[in-house]
Amino acid sequence: MATIPTQNAVPSEAARDLKFNSGKIDEFVTSKALEYFDRFGESHLTIEGMRWMVERVIETFKVDMNEAIIAAGYIPMDSFQQGAEITKRNEILRDETTGEYYRWDGDLPKSVPAGSIPESVGGVGAGKWVGVGDASLRSEINKGRFKYSDAESVYYVPGFVFDDTTDNRDVAFSYPGKIYIPDGVTIRVNFLPSDDVRKFVGEGKLIVKNQWYGNDIIFDIGQATNGNKKSFSGALYQEIRDQSLTTIGIVGDSITDGAWGKQDWSSPATDGTAARNLKSPVNYNHSDNGGSHSWAAHWMMLLNTVQSRYGTTPIFQVYNASLSGAKLSDGWGYRNFDYGFFGNEAYGSKPPELCLLAMGWNDAFTDIDTYRDQIDMFVRKAWGYGCAVAIVTVNDNDPNRIGFERATKKEMCGRLGIEYYDLGETLTENSNINMYSQKLYYVKGDKTWDDVHPQELGQMSMGNAMFMQTLGEKYVRHVKPGDVMNSVAVDRYWSAITYPSGLSLKPKYSSVGGTPVLEKIKYLPSVTSPKENVTFTTLVYCENDGTSLVVLEPWNAHTQAMVDATHITVESPVGITLPSSGAHKDRNDLINSFTRVLFGYAASQYFGKERTLSTYCGQMRKGLNKITITYGGRPEQAFYPCLKFGNVHSDGVSIPNVRLSAVGSMTKPTLLMTRSQNISDEIITDIMSGDRLSSVPNSYLYPGSVIGKFRSASGMKKNCYAALNYDPLLNTGVLVGCASDGRLAIGTWNKGEPTDWLFLSGSTDFESKPFVVWIYSSVSNSKYSFMVKTDDGRINSAAFYSSVETSGYVGVFNRGAGDSIVEFDFELITTKV
């Protein structure tokens, strides 16, 4: 258009504007473009543009209607005009002449021949064709009818009362199909223990009355239908974080019941009927009574051992609702979720927060589909009541059962998306330690063999396995020879508990100094105690057989003499101590002594306070080990121990065939070689590490357990000595060699010339004569005793006890002016581990 309009305000009488607008009217009416532009450059719809927009709105409405129809659970079957066969309540037909959809409300199936309309094949109305157009569609969407193809909305099931007082249980279970409860609907259905909760699907909730104690319990249908997305192990970790009381229910058979976890085990009482349901109502905690040494009770103890690092009050409580001879496949496990928890005042008369299903041994030869179905029922019931759920296999000793049980449980856990725990592998591994221990796992007090019901040690091993597969994965150090547990993250791995108050102490890091060792360490964690004894406890998992333990006391600060002993104890498998009394005292004492792998005094028991000391403990067992170090003397401040792990088969010090030059007039002993490139920290890492750069500890858990041999093939020149157990940080050790008068001499180097020289009787012409020094740990205490022998038998000394805490390396010391060549070999080994 050539005419150029003005920019006059609207309306404009200008000729140019009138001419321009007449052209725009033609464009509005006849153009196929969707828009045109006025004289100000603004866009407007043409008639074609308006038509296009209306079509889009109509199309969108159709899409929304189709989506709404599908969302409501309807299945479109095309139209009356084309014909169809209606077999389900949620199948609908469209009348092509009106566009309306209808569902059949009469008897099914319903045949609709081609060329029909609603009026010609049954009519429209109640019990006939019912429109599912806008109004009725919205209503049925809101009520959830046909959302599930196999369930009817509760709104359309006759007899339901929508309040929180009327019990709809009989109405519900007299209805032949499943019932859908929409979101936002809460009604009362007082389930009986055997009622299948899968009768209901949807998102709503039920109010369930506890038939024994009358309290109301909420059942969440949405969680039962779809899972509650609660991880079992995740829930345990969360409770540690939140420090809240956590109840864990377990439903199992005789093994979980605790059969032979102690010899006077007994099952909980039943109702006396053939169904053998747990007695209800009752006030009985099986974990404190007949099942006190079930694997579940040992597991609970370990959970609370971890908890003790963070608080005084145990937060984990296991509710054991198991029974010898019980099956899952006959419904016992499902029923006794109610009998065991709702009917038991000791268990709170309500669902636990977490729930374990540990049944299967007695189900091995039942129908597999029934077993799967009962697992599904049980899990969904527990879900609905808010439990985090997992499944357990406890024993893999029977090949037929384990093939059935393990495979089925793992399959169902995969289907349901829950965790599976297998305790059998640890049980098998631990029970095969040696030929002797097998009887403690499978032989009962009456001398009969029973590998169905693991005995005391078997129950402990299963409890250890369950712990390692739950909290143990994060709160237990896995260790192997060469590893060290120093002072990092002590609050994750250690608890510090006072006695007798039972206070849980928290660590505090602070700078340290004042001694050569402390100056090198720089920082240490400690606890402040109200002048009570303090027990440090940690759990470690040994990856290898033969793993040994060295305990380092970085610093001890007892406020008084060691009135109470400082003990080190290592236990494995870890469990609740059996009673040392009653008819089974001898057997219980044997079991307790077997689990106590290591026990004895720490170095501070001998050397006193204000020291940095190390104690060689010996061999732990493969698997879970509990290490406790109890400080007597009621310290005001107690420092966390450090641990070094070695290999008992190669522990010690080994120095073969050394030829060393000792320069004249040494001011102090010198180590075997320059160690700056080799030594790790001169504090713990090299203790008993098995090579020529190894250090010896201050003491041994078992006095009399260590034997060493220092052999000088060509002897020593006068005033030349071997320095044994020399600590370069403390500048202490023991000298053995040839005195200035030619006699063999031994003395303690304590930051300077010995003042306690002992000149051994015998020849005075001992210069450069071969001799052997045998080294023993004293029977009365863990300080060294030294015995000197010569190859010709002329010297055989009495015992000599050092007056300082001797630990360290091998070196030489030369008091004379001239240089000397020293040839020797040295070996220190443990003889009792």
Image (cartoon, grey):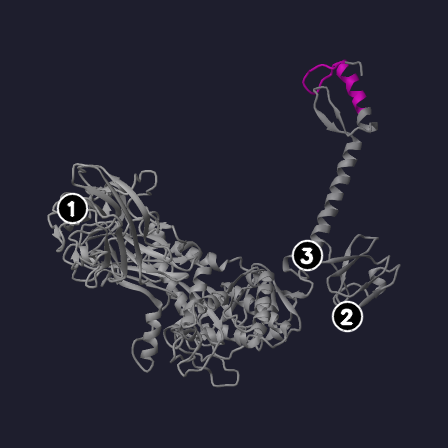
| Local SS, label 2 | loop
Where is residue 557? Give x, y as percent. Answer: 19, 52
Q: Is residue 562 toward the left or the right of residue 689 in the image?
A: left
Of residues 24 and 613, the one nearer the viewer is: 613
Where is residue 296? Give x, y as percent. Answer: 43, 69
Q: Quadrant of residue 348?
A: bottom left
Q: Is residue 48 toward the left or the right of residue 285 in the image?
A: right
Q: Which mark is residue 107?
A: 2
Q: Amino acid at mark 3?
A: Ala
Where is residue 380? Give x, y as percent. Answer: 56, 66
Q: Quadrant of residue 128?
A: bottom right
| Local SS, label 3 | loop
Q: Amino acid at mark 2?
A: Asp
Q: Which residue has dot 1 on it?
A: 750
Q: Which residue has dot 3 on it?
A: 72
| Local SS, label 1 | strand
Magenta highlight range = 4-25
Q: Amino acid at mark 1?
A: Asn
Q: Earlier in the sequence, mark 1 or mark 2?
A: 2
